[in-house]
């Protein structure tokens, strides 16, 4: 550690100060005396840590002094000691110096006024006044000493910055102490001029702003002293300027000249002084200084009137307003590069300003700056934290509510440009700009005078917002979005902020403001607003909205229609899907007939081969709408095979949507199908969705299947028969679903298939009753199927094995029951490989989490094994179900190798035991 020799004189001064201090309760002072005397006697070196230790002990001594009275000189003597220590090396760091200043300022400035302390102890009134002035002098001497320790602009800032909050105190005596201390340090700076104060001096705007506000202080003495401090500051800056020009100047003469130039102080109208000062300081104010000056002026609006009285609050508001408006009038052109910082500062300060008139004053810079630099102001406002609270919302509205307001047309164009941006940058980073633009638009829509201007670009705004909804589904945005706050202007239920919901809300607001209340209500009734924020349903919500606008004859539809045509080819998949979903519904309009065929029918035909299934389904919807025109009907019907083929491997819900649309073509006038392959292919597409996990998909696909079967005509082709025979097992198994709606649709479809194929199924095949305890019914159905459709028996087995993997327990149960009755009917058809597959499947089902599945799996095992013995089938090698007949009929103490019929425990108990073991695992 570097050591620095203490000057003997300085060490003597420290010692004498410490000796004068009275003994304290914990002996701090005597300990400090001992430390310093030890260093003095040994002529030791004062290490950095030793100095810090002494400073901290002195700070603790000051902190222990009472804040409601001044009864001893301990506080003063401690600061005198710290003043002497400041002459020693090493110097304190900036952080340590700020902490020391804060401690001493807090201890002195928090004291009651001298008058209050004198009234409390009238006997010591004169002593209290003397001690108070000594203490304040000691503080100011310490501040000057600390500045001398680091005579730089940064050093001066570290001394003056802690005084700032006290200059805006609601108590006059605290403001007076802060102003007096500021002026004291500035006066010393003028006398010594230890550094070159350039226009980039970091605290210039801050210091000037605080002193300017105090010129308008209700207390005349404070205002007068603040103006004197500004005169000193102006003189310092003038001296530095003349020093650069190598001009010799008398400091005091220059000070007196400036005092006459900037003054005299006008107690009747102090704002005249403020205006004069701001006008004359122009040569020394750069962008950062102007920014600091503006933000400092807002400090006078933070509710000081609550403690200083109504008149005091009004005077402070007036001083702030004059400062803000005059600074922007004179120096607005200098702040272009710092506009984001100004907007951020205003946003932060508004949280502390509650009085309505004060908030109006605080928002003045927003409209004043926007009138000259609208783009920069809007870009800065887009960075406000989301969701917008009342402060951010008010800043947006300020753009057009206050004069001078910005050009609303240009403002809306800027927001539209931001709404056209993708919320994900080319580097894959999420961007908050589109969401922020949507939030800003929502606030502007709340201003009635803006609504008329919005109509000009209403179609563009609507489509841009709908596309942004699609972009924001499931998007994780940057960390500028805070958790919900009490002030959050969100839903009435104060739900957590979800970006996509917020943009949906803006879409709804835009519709209502544009007079589309019927359309908004239609979407509400259809659940469209909820669907709009879901990835799988966004296109459905957009289609619903477009359909509603067509139904209610929205006046803007023609503009939207012609705007959409070029949009269909732009952007990425989400962009195209949203635009296409809106466009296809507008094809219902009479005006759409004027669109060239290449942009209507041509685009829809191209969509049939698109790689995105949603685009295929939307194209089918568009073609179906076009088919309502007589001149397009034949062309659309010719495309029917391509439409149906495009639905292979498509999600069940999309298949349902497309199938519902295709029904209108099947029912169309003049529709004659010469080739039944289209119907067969449609049936092939619908069948896999019978077991979809979504109930509405299952019901719709089964119902549509039956309706397509009704369309089939004689003669029956082999493809038809194979398809309908392949439907038997799925329908029979799904009828055990337990859902009445599903069962009803299955019965209808099964009946239609039977009628067309002339089947004579057992009567109980059409029963709604469950197969539980109806094994004979299942056996009769299986026997009929194998006897009637022997060539398809293995297909039936494969289908039932596939259903054992279904997520629905009811289908696993019905499939294993079916297998248990089907396999015994297949005698010579069954191969060893097939039997092994059946055995493995049923064995797995014995460990199913559902107890009923386990039970019926065990029963199926018994039926299949009994059938094997009865029919003398080739038994699978190594089968744990089956044992050597030579050992099965002689005594064996172990029941594991016995046939099921010879075991002591029933198959039900075995199944339950197996199920319990699987649960434990």
Image: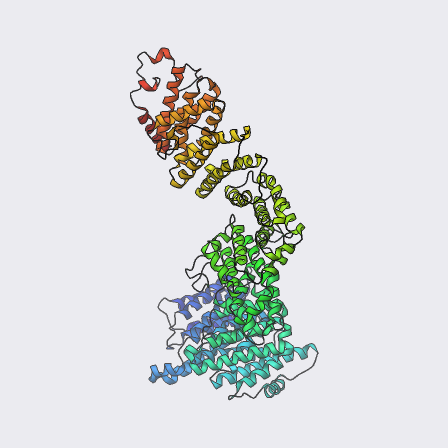
Residue nearest the viewer, comparing 918 with 587: 587
The answer to whether any part of residue 156 appears in the image is no
Where does residue 249 sit, x and y in percent of width and height?
A: 66, 83
Please name whichever residue, 621 or 911, is drawn nearer the observer in this view of the structure.
Answer: 621
Q: Quadrant of residue 920?
A: top left
* 857 to 659, vertically: above or below: above
**Residue 734 appears at what percent x and percent y?**
42, 35
Is residue 447 shown above or below 115?
above
How many numbered marks, from 0 up?
0
Residue 400: x and y, percent?
A: 56, 72
Residue 903 visible in rendering: yes
- Screen quadrant of the C terminus: top left
Residue lying farthest to the front in this orientation: 670
Picture coordinates of residue 857, whole percent (x, y):
38, 27
- Drawn side of residue 469 relative to residue 23, left or right: right
Task: Name the image colouring.
Answer: rainbow
Residue 613 vs residue 39: left or right?
Answer: right
In this view, 626 is above or below 69: above
Q: Where does the N terminus fall, quadrant-wise?
A: bottom right
At a point 41% along the width and 21% down the height, the residue shown is 824
Taking depth in this image into account, of 168 and 627 the one nearest to the observer is: 627
In the rendered view, tell whether residue 849 sits above or below residue 99.
Answer: above
């Amino acid at each position: 550690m570097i050591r620095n020799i203490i000057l003997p004189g300085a060490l003597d001064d420290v010692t004498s100060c410490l000796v004068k201090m009275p003994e304290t309760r914990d002996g701090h002072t005597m300990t400090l005396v001992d430390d310093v005397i030890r260093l003095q006697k040994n002529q030791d070196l004062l290490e950095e840590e030793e100095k810090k230790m002494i400073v901290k002990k002195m700070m603790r001594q000051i902190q222990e002094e009472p804040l409601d009275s001044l009864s001893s000189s301990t506080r003063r003597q401690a600061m005198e000691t710290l003043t002497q220590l400041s002459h020693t090396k090493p110097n304190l760091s900036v952080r340590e110096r700020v902490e020391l200043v804060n401690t001493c300022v807090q201890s002195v400035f928090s004291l009651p006024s001298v008058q209050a302390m004198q009234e409390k102890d009238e006997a010591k009134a004169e002593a209290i006044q003397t001690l108070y002035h000594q203490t304040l002098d000691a503080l100011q001497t310490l501040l000057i000493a600390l500045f001398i320790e680091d005579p730089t602009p940064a050093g001066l800032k570290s001394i003056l910055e802690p005084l700032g909050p006290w200059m805006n105190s609601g108590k006059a005596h605290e403001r007076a102490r802060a102003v007096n201390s500021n002026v004291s340090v500035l006066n010393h700076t003028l006398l010594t001029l230890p550094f070159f104060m350039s226009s980039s001096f970091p605290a210039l705007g801050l210091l000037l702003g605080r002193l300017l506000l105090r010129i308008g202080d209700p207390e005349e003495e404070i205002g007068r002293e603040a103006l004197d401090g500004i005169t000193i500051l102006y003189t310092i800056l003038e001296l530095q300027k003349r020093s650069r020009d190598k001009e010799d100047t008398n400091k005091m003469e220059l000070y007196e000249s400036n005092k006459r130039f900037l003054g005299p102080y006008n107690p009747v109208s102090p704002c005249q002084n403020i205006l004069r000062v701001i006008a004359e300081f122009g040569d020394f104010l750069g962008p950062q200084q102007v920014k600091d000056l503006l933000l400092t002026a807002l400090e006078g609006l933070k509710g000081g009137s609550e403690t200083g009285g109504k008149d005091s609050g009004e005077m402070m508001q007036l001083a702030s307003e004059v400062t803000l408006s005059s600074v922007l009038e004179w120096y607005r052109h200098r702040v272009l590069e710092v506009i984001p910082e100004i907007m951020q500062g205003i946003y932060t300060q508004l949280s502390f300003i509650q009085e309505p008139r004060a908030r109006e004053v605080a928002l003045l810079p927003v409209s004043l700056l926007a009138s000259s630099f609208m783009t920069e102001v809007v870009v800065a406002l887009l960075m406000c934290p989301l969701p917008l609270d009342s402060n951010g919302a008010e800043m947006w509205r300020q753009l057009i509510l206050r004069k001078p307001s910005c050009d609303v047309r240009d403002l809306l164009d800027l927001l539209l440009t931001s709404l056209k941006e993708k919320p994900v940058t080319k580097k894959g980073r999420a961007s908050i700009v589109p969401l922020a633009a949507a939030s800003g638009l929502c606030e502007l829509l709340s201003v009635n005078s803006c609504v008329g201007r919005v109509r000009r670009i209403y179609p563009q705004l609507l489509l841009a917002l709908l596309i942004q909804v699609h972009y924001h589904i499931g998007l994780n945005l940057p960390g500028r979005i805070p958790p919900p706050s009490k002030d959050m202007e969100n839903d009435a239920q104060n739900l957590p902020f979800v970006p996509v919901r917020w943009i949906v809300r803006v879409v709804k607001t835009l519709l209502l403001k544009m007079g589309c209340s019927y359309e908004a209500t239609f979407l509400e009734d259809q659940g469209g607003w909820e669907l709009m924020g879901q990835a799988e349903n966004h296109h459905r919500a957009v289609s619903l909205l477009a359909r509603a606008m067509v139904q209610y004859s929205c006046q803007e539809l023609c503009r939207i229609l012609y705007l959409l045509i070029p949009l269909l080819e732009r952007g990425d998949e989400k962009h195209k899907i949203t635009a296409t979903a809106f466009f296809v519904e507008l094809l219902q309009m009479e005006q759409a007939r004027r669109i060239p065929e290449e942009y209507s029918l041509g685009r829809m035909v191209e969509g049939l081969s698109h790689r995105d299934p949603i685009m295929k389904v939307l194209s089918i919807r568009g073609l179906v709408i076009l088919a309502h025109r007589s001149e397009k009907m034949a062309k659309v019907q010719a495309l029917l095979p391509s439409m149906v083929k495009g639905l292979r491997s498509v999600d069940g819900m999309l298949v349902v949507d497309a199938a519902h649309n295709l029904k209108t073509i099947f029912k169309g006038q003049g529709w004659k199908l010469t080739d039944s392959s289209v119907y067969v292919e449609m049936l092939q597409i619908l069948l896999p969705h019978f077991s979809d996990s979504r109930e509405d998909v299952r019901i719709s696909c089964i119902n549509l299947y039956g309706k397509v079967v009704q369309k089939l005509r004689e003669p029956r082709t082999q493809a038809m028969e194979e398809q309908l025979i392949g439907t038997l097992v799925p329908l029979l198994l799904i009828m055990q679903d337990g859902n009445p709606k599903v069962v009803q649709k299955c019965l209808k479809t099964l009946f239609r298939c039977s009628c067309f194929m002339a089947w004579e199924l057992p009567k109980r095949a059409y029963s709604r009753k469950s197969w539980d305890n109806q094994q004979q019914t299942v056996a009769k159905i299986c026997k009929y199927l194998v006897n009637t459709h022997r060539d398809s028996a293995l297909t039936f087995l494969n289908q039932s094995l596939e259903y054992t993997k279904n997520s629905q327990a009811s289908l696993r149960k019905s499939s294993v029951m079916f297998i248990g009755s089907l396999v015994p009917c297949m005698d010579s058809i069954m191969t060893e490989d097939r039997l092994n597959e059946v055995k493995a499947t049923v064995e797995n089902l014995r460990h199913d989490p559902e107890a009923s599945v386990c039970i019926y799996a065990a029963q199926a095992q018994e039926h299949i094994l009994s059938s094997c013995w009865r029919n003398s089938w080739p038994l699978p090698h190594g089968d744990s179900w089956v044992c050597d007949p030579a050992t099965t009929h002689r005594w064996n103490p172990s029941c594991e190798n016995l046939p099921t019929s010879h075991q002591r425990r029933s198959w039900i108990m075995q199944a339950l035991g197996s199920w319990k073991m699987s649960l434990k695992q």
